[in-house]
Image: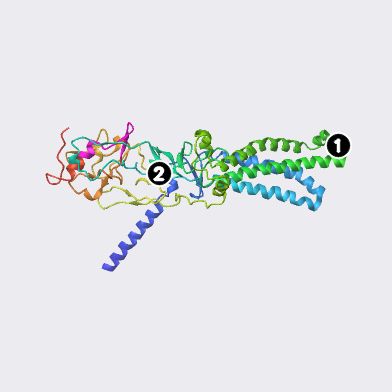
Amino acid sequence: MDRAVADHHQTLSRTSQSKNSKMAKRVYQVWKGSNRFLLCGRLIFGPDVQSLAVTIFLIVAPVACFCVFVGRHLLHHYGNAGIPIMVVAVVYTVYVLVLLFLTSGRDPGIIPRNTHPPEPEDFDSATPPSEWGGHTPRLRLPRTKDVIVNGVPVKTKYCDTCMLYRPPRCSHCSICNNCVLCFDHHCPWVGQCIGQRNYRFFFMFVSSTSLLCVFVFAMCALYIKILMDTESHTVWKALARSPAAIVLMVYTFISVWFVGGLTVFHLYLIGTNQTTYENFRYRYDNKVNPYNQGCPSNFKEVFCTTVPPSQNKFRAKVEEVTPGQLGVPTLTRQAGEDVTSSTGKGPDLELGYQATWPGADETVAEGGELEMMGGRVSTGSELGIGMEKDGFDPHHMDQGRAPVFHPRRSSWGRKSGSWEITPDRLAVSSEGTHPTNGGATPPSDR
């Protein structure tokens, strides 16, 4: 009988785990950026992915017109010798489209967001609250930090959205709402940021498109020359015989100025080891470029190095672990993942934390504080942050005792350019470590 009961409980446990596994969301489903995902997170695009359809049409439509109105006449004129013309046109167009998808459908080098701001360096966690002199320590988080790159100091900025100091050459894309490594620019034609992991494919796409325009223009000019030679027409009569060739020559001539000019510009950027963002913003003309290692080494860095792996696992599951009797979700975060709440939605740092232990909903006071056991506990909502995981120690929450916060592990709220621990947390922390009245904290004098 006992064995049957144990088997029943084991079956229920497996069923529950199976349901939780099916209900668990994946990283791409709770992604904080503005990106759009396809094929269950296998492809990542920017929010303006619709422009990708326009780019594909601008490439495929002229090539299709070339094959129908010009290529078939060349095939008829040259016979078997004209087959390579059609093959090159079709195969090379497919190659350009592959480069386009490699540019637009992959992670450009997104840095995973932090769940809380970094800790100020001048805060000593070993100092007990009793030695703070009754004053709240005002700890400032510097807006910039100096990093030495090849012997040259480079300033790195703090990103309020991603809550991290951006590495050198990293910038936050306002369109995709992500910090991207080696950010070059956001290209609306491919619907994606251009960064560390797709810059090589972007340049290859632009340069290959330029060559495709040159090829179509040259083949149309060859067809006009054939009409002039075979039918003794002048240039104008030959052009009148093939209006499609005229349209294609005008279209490719205009396009090659755009994509060809872009190719030449990026050749210059690669040779000097700059990004488009750096070139327009910093202008290294009168400054030392710490990244320039010489033209050959710069080209080798772009084309002959391994593309670094993505720091984000978009298809990884976001796990939720609910400890014992607390009812407070504890979130585990893998590398590159964005944490989520028990509701399946990402913890909105602007909305604050919603208490989940019994009876807490009725005791939430104004300013984001909880009236518990006569004491006031800051929930962090007045700072725009949550109590989840950072600063909240579930091991110190017993029945009849208010939760205790560790100052060093607590999140820091941003106020007027500084990072400050609120007096509520200081009071709860100091009072929670010396419980009285049967474990309950006495009311604070305010």
- Percent coordinates x, y for residue 317 in the rendering: 41, 52
Q: Is residue 422 magenta?
A: yes
Total marks shown come to 2
Query: In the displayed image of the protein, which residue is found farthest to the top?
Result: 416
- Percent coordinates x, y for residue 229 in the rendering: 86, 41
Q: Nearer the viewer, residue 301 or 194?
A: 301
The residue at the point 25 percent across, 48 percent down is: 393
Q: Is residue 418 magenta?
A: yes
Q: Quadrant of the C terminus?
A: top left
Q: Nearer the viewer, residue 390 or 322?
A: 390
Q: Please, what is the three-letter code of the amino acid marked with disc 2?
A: Arg
Query: In the displayed image of the protein, which residue is found farthest to the right?
Result: 232
Q: Please tell me in which quadrant of the rendered image residue 130 appears.
A: top left
Q: Is residue 180 visible?
A: yes
The residue at the point 23 percent across, 46 percent down is: 126
Q: Is residue 367 left or right of residue 303?
A: left
Characterize the local packing of mark 2: few (<14), some (14-19) or many (20 or more) Cα atoms within 10 angstroms.
many
**Residue bearing the label numbered 2:** 113
Q: Quadrant of the N terminus?
A: bottom left
In magenta, the rendered stretch is 412-426
